[in-house]
Image (cartoon, rainbow, N blue to C red):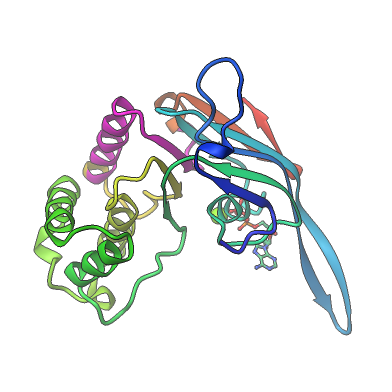
Amino acid sequence: MSSNAQLTTGPEALEPGQGPPPVLDATGVAKAYTRWRRLSRRKVPVLTGADLALAAGEVVGLVGENGSGKTTLMRILVGDLAADSGTVRLSGTMGYCPQQPIVYPRLTCDEHFELFGAAHGMRPAAQRDATGDLYAQLGFERYSSTRADQLSGGTLAKLNLGLALLPDPDVLLLDEPYAGFDWDTYQKFWGMVAERRTRGRSVLIISHFIADEQRFDRVIKLSDGRTWSS
Ligand SMILES: Nc1ncnc2c1ncn2[C@@H]1O[C@H](COP(=O)(O)OP(=O)(O)O)[C@@H](O)[C@H]1O
Ligand SMILES: [Mg+2]
């Protein structure tokens, strides 16, 4: 994890209080990017004190205009990007589906699942079982031997989501996961999210579809560098 935000994991991250503690808890997250203009540079603030908490079994949406900082915040939550200040606490395991799929062009779907399964420390049999389930649930088994650089945008989006789901993480962070999905896959996606919720797994989804709001337990809006309940 490369974030400057203080990141703690495990039981020591849990605070005493009423009710179950959040599985993911971010407070006061700030981030400014450096912009160069000719020879001078200036800091452009994107996040100025964003707070976000996710409870076990919650499905939360993160909405906001283009450029409002949704991806920046999610990358900080994941530990992929350093915050300037703030605290991020995670309890349990995390999966991340980035907005731009990060895949290896010459590897097949099967090879991606093997690679990611090994990276997560999964036993080969468990990895194969989980991969088979994901192929069936998302409907792309016929591409199991196809290289990533030969996949359509929609199938690449399924692989991207499948890789985040593979280890069945406690907390799943998805950055506009269904942008390339057709309607059938979109429905399957929400079925998978609902099934995770019943098992106490948490999901944070960046979405720009306002029509999705009824599918979430809660929607958080990001604007002016801060998070707002809506
Ligand atoms: N690596 C970067 N360097 C400089 N500016 C960036 C970088 N990443 C994002 N930005 C800028 O930060 C702002 C927020 O971007 P982003 O987090 O991608 O927003 P969103 O996901 O809500 O569309 C935008 O103005 C974007 O241009
Ligand atoms: Mg984004």
Please name whichever residue, 70 or 13, is drawn nearer the observer in this view of the structure: 13
Residue 139 falls inside the magenta stretch: no
Position of 28 compared to 113: left or right?
right
Residue that sits furthest to the front in the current view = 12
x and y percentages locating residue 130 in the rendered image: 17, 51
Q: How many marks?
A: 0
Question: Which quadrant of the figure contains the N terminus?
Answer: bottom right
Residue 114 falls in which quadrant of the image? bottom left
Please name whichever residue, 191 or 210, is drawn nearer the observer in this view of the structure: 191
x and y percentages locating residue 156 in the rendered image: 29, 64
Q: Which residues are magenta?
A: 185-211
Residue 188 falls inside the magenta stretch: yes
Residue that sits furthest to the top in the current view = 18
Seen in the picture, residue 165 relative to 4 is either above or below; the reply is above
Q: What's the residue at 53%, 16% (across, down)?
A: 19
Q: What's the residue at 27%, 70% (across, down)?
A: 115
Please name whichever residue, 140 or 117, is drawn nearer the observer in this view of the structure: 117
Please name whichever residue, 202 or 224, is drawn nearer the observer in this view of the structure: 202
Q: What's the residue at 46%, 24% (across, down)?
A: 217
